[in-house]
Structures are given as structure tokens and as C-alpha cells.
Image (tube, rainbow, N blue to C red):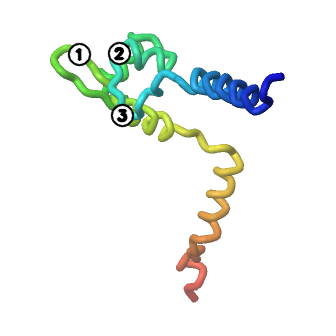
Amino acid sequence: MENPFELFLERLDRIEKAIEKLSVKEPSPSTDELLNVDQIAAYLLLAKSSIYGLTATSKIPHYKYGKKLYFKKSEIDDWILAKRIKTMDEIEQEAMEYIRNRPRFISSSKHKK
């Protein structure tokens, strides 16, 4: 009869090896990674011509080395997040705060006797 502890250790070994295989992943791209025009177009789901248009008008953060364009992924992420559209609730809340925090000016002509 086999030793139950040996069976347990063998199974544990197999599980450990299976976990090691699963945990081997490709390295995730760094947020400071430099991307070229093809990569940034794929990342933003835009046509390359759109990327060239954005760079020509300096609407997208980029770097130019010779004739090559490069984009820092972290800067592109920040650029995208800066373009957030506020919800109607947020706009209404800001309007209410603005009204609450501004003193009402009384026309001087109404108080003249």
C-alpha cells in the first residue's frame, strides 16, 4: 500500500507546477512606454491620418525625432482623461454652488432717493 503522504506531496507538486505555468505572463506595457504612430492609432482606435492631424495642430502630446513621431503612453492617458465630459448632475451642482457663493449685487439706482 502506498504512503498517503507521498500521494499528497505528488499532487501538491503537480498543483505547484500548474500554478507556475499560469502565472507566467507577458510583461504588461509600462505607462512610460513610448509608442509609435501605428501603436498609438491602435491604442486610441483612430486612423493614422487622424493621429497625424492631431500632431500637426499640436492637440495631442507627442515627441518628434527626425521624421518619426513618438507618444508617451502615460501622457496620452492623462490627455484622454482631461477630456472628460461632465454629467448634467455635475453641471447643475456647480451652477448651484456658483449661485450660492456669489453675493447678489443691488443696483445703486434702486437705493438712490
Label 3 sits on a secondary structure element that is: loop
On screen, residue 46 versus residue 98, left or right, reads left
Percent position of residue 100, x then y: 64, 70
Does residue 18 show up?
yes
On screen, residue 75 versus residue 70, left or right, reads right
**Residue pictured at 50% horizontal, 38% vertical:** 81
Mark 3 or mark 1, whichever is nearer to me: 3
**Dot 1, crowdedness within 10 Å: few (<14), some or many (≥20)?**
few
The single residue placed furthest to the right in the displayed view is 1
Q: Which mark is residue 37?
A: 2
**Dot 3, crowdedness within 10 Å: few (<14), some or many (≥20)?**
few
Specify which label sits upstream in the sequence, 1 or 2: 2
**In the image, residue 54 above or below residue 101:** above
- In the picture of the structure, the residue carrying the numbered disc 3 is 32
Percent position of residue 67, x then y: 19, 14
Q: Quadrant of the N terminus?
A: top right
Determine the CA span between mark 3 and mark 1: 18 Å
Depth check, front residue: 37 or 5:
5
Percent position of residue 47, x then y: 45, 11
Q: Which mark is residue 68?
A: 1
Determine the CA span between mark 1 and mark 2: 8 Å
Label 2 sits on a secondary structure element that is: helix
**In the image, residue 102 above or below residue 32:** below
Specify which label sits upstream in the sequence, 3 or 1: 3
Say what amino acid the circle numbered 2 marks: Val
**Dot 2, crowdedness within 10 Å: few (<14), some or many (≥20)?**
some
Depth check, front residue: 109 or 10:
10
